Amino acid sequence: MSIEIKVPALPESVSSATLSAWHVKAGEPVKREQNLVDLETDKVMLEVPSTVDGILKEIRIQPGATVNAGDVIGIIEEGASAAGPKADEPQVMAKNEAKASQPTSTTTPAPATNGGGDDQQGPAVRKLLAELGLSAAQITGTGKGGRLTVEDVKAFAAKPAPAAAPAAKAEAPKPASKPAAGSREEQRVPMTRIRARIAERLKESQNTAAMLTTFNEVDLKAVNDLRAKFKDSFEKTHGSKLGFMSFFVKASIEALKKYPLVNASIDGNDIVYHAYYDIGVAVSSERGLVVPILRDADAMSFSEIEKTIGELGAKAKNNKLTMEDLTGGTFSITNGGIFGSMMSTPILNPPQAAILGMHGIFDRPVVVKGEIVIRPMMYIALTYDHRIIDGRDAVLFLKSIKDSLEDPSRLLLQL
């Protein structure tokens, strides 16, 4: 029995997706619940699992193509055995079978053709050809009937230009992530959906909000001492390490309670005050920067914050974040310090009105009670929407965070 593999219902506000990669080739066996294919949206990566045991009989949509909910992207033959010849594989099998059926000849066989002009290629291939400024006639196809696949076009685009004078023995070009030293080659790669969405939202933020940034510096000796004193017992008791982020989340929440405008957002001509604290924590992933949400973070303990951040970070790394993980948020924190940043001006995550930037911790000479001492210092930055947050509130908000971190007992007493 043939079972259609369909694009599942997409998350709200997402109209289409890009087929990112197949994890099974045509003709290979599949198991129920096995991930068959990844679909990339502008927010999350979706997995499409098999609903039955069987054989992947046909791949109808190739990587790089745009798909909509309900589209049939492949066919599974339920209960079929993997023994014997594999089912036709559009990219490679058809070509191999065609070669096998041809009579043996002592002459060198001609290379596969491109199976027609640009207008005879699939929609994903035509789109990629147009973006790269290429013609189908330039490229040898490996797909069914000699047609081009997205991989054919990308591989051709990654090849360096041929040398002016042929060498006696040339090696096959190897695609590289960056040009060789001294090379003037260029590589044009389409933005991923999530990168395009990040660009759109950040530009929207610049065009809409009246952004201003205020700075302060924090002496983290007290936090360092507390972490050093309790790190072993904390990890033994709670099963997670005591990091810096839980202190910053807690300090931010206490400051947000004092200055509620920083936790607000703009909706048209209205200011929306949020009586809850959903804190976004920026996480770097291979697909780009994402901001998963700690929901009701004010009700979380230090260990719950650390565990949740760890879980969300792992999900981001493995492309497992869901729309629920990313939706909402009333205030965000970003930590450029893990990459060595000394100071930066973070950009707002709309529709939020403010974002806190953490930076690197560096030993610096400071004056404490009239004496010069060496302390672990961090610059912190608050970028805020000046349309609703005045400079006074922004400065005092950052001062509140500084006070909490320099005397962590204030967090316990909620001062």
Image (tube, helix red, strand yellow):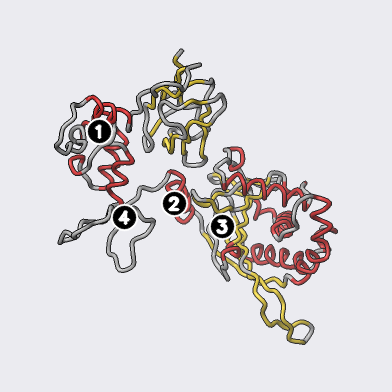
Amino acid at the residue labelled 3: Asp
Q: Which of marks 2 and 1 is in front?
A: 1
Q: Position of residue 311 (x, y in %)?
A: 66, 46
N-terminal-most mark, 2 or 1: 1
Query: What residue sits right under mark 3 in the picture?
Result: 385
In 3D space, how far apart are the residues under numbered discs 4 and 2 (Cα atoms)? 20 Å
Q: Who is closer to the viewer here, 245 or 48? A: 48
Q: Residue at x 63, y 67 (%)?
A: 380
x, y percentage for residue 203?
Answer: 44, 53
* Number of callouts: 4
Determine the residue located farthest toward the top in the rendered image.
1
Residue beneath disc 4: 187
Q: How far apart are marks 2 and 1 (CA)?
A: 34 Å
Of the image marks 1 and 3, the number of the one nearer the N terminus: 1
Q: In this view, does 394 lie to the left or right of 24?
A: right
Q: Distance between the residues labelled 4 and 1?
A: 23 Å
Residue occupying the point 76% across, 66% down: 223
Tell me the CA gap for discs 4 and 3: 38 Å
Frontmost of labels 1 and 3 is 1
